[in-house]
Image (tube, grey):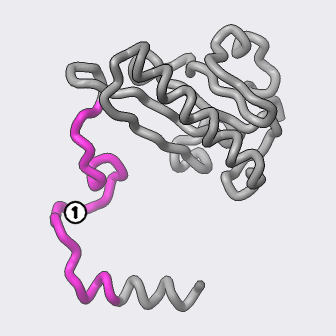
Amino acid sequence: MLCVFCEDQNIKIRIVGENERAIAFLTNIPIVSGHTLIIPRRHVKYYEEVTSDEKESIETLRMHVKSALQKTFSAEGFNYAWNEEPIDGQSVPHFHLHMIPRKEGDEGVHEYEPRKFLYRPGSRAVSPDEELKTTAEEIRKNI
């Protein structure tokens, strides 16, 4: 299967930073100007496949790019995200961290309401303690 991040030569002109194990480049479908993707150079699909050295390289690059985006776009905050599998919105099967610089007045979603963002059914604001207790117990059984 072709990986656009590994094969598309047009990405090279969008690179904003790189190091030995990671590359940061502008996405071609930005939420706001400066929307950057950070990937390991090695092709891996899941975060769990990223080595400790690659994670360190991604984090180092993230900090450098963050500073540059703050200076370039007067970013006041950032959204960070990655998706796994098409059901969660992953369109390229190569792990990539989205880094979205945000400031007052930019376009896109400003209200971060997880129930809307992640499509949680229902409208209750707070889950009942008993439900949370039961869910926590079920998760602990599998750890």
Q: Position of residue 128 (x, y in %)?
A: 20, 81
Main SS category, magenta section? loop
Q: Is residue 48 left or right of residue 81?
A: right
User: In the image shown, does 103 or 118 lie closer to the viewer?
Assistant: 103
Q: Which residue is drawn at the image coordinates 69% and 51% (left, top)?
A: 46
Q: Is residue 143 above or below residue 65?
A: below
Q: Position of residue 43 (x, y in %)?
A: 80, 39
Where's the C terminus, which quadrant? bottom right
Q: Position of residue 8 (x, y in %)?
A: 77, 17
Q: Is residue 79 covered in magenta?
A: no
Residue 16, by quadrant, is top right
* Amino acid under disc 1: Gly
Q: Which residue is drawn at the image coordinates 54% and 49% (left, top)?
A: 87
Q: Which residue is drawn at the image coordinates 64% and 13% (left, top)?
A: 14
The residue indicated by pointer 1 is 122
Q: Is residue 118 covered in magenta?
A: yes
Q: Is residue 135 above or below residue 88?
A: below
Where's the N terminus, which quadrant? top right
Crowd band around label 1 with a 10 angstrom C-alpha radius: few (<14), some (14–19), many (20+): few
Magenta stretch, residue numbers: 109-133
Q: Which residue is drawn at the image coordinates 81% and 22% (left, top)?
A: 7
Disc 1 on helix, strand or loop? loop
Q: Is residue 18 left or right of residue 87?
A: right
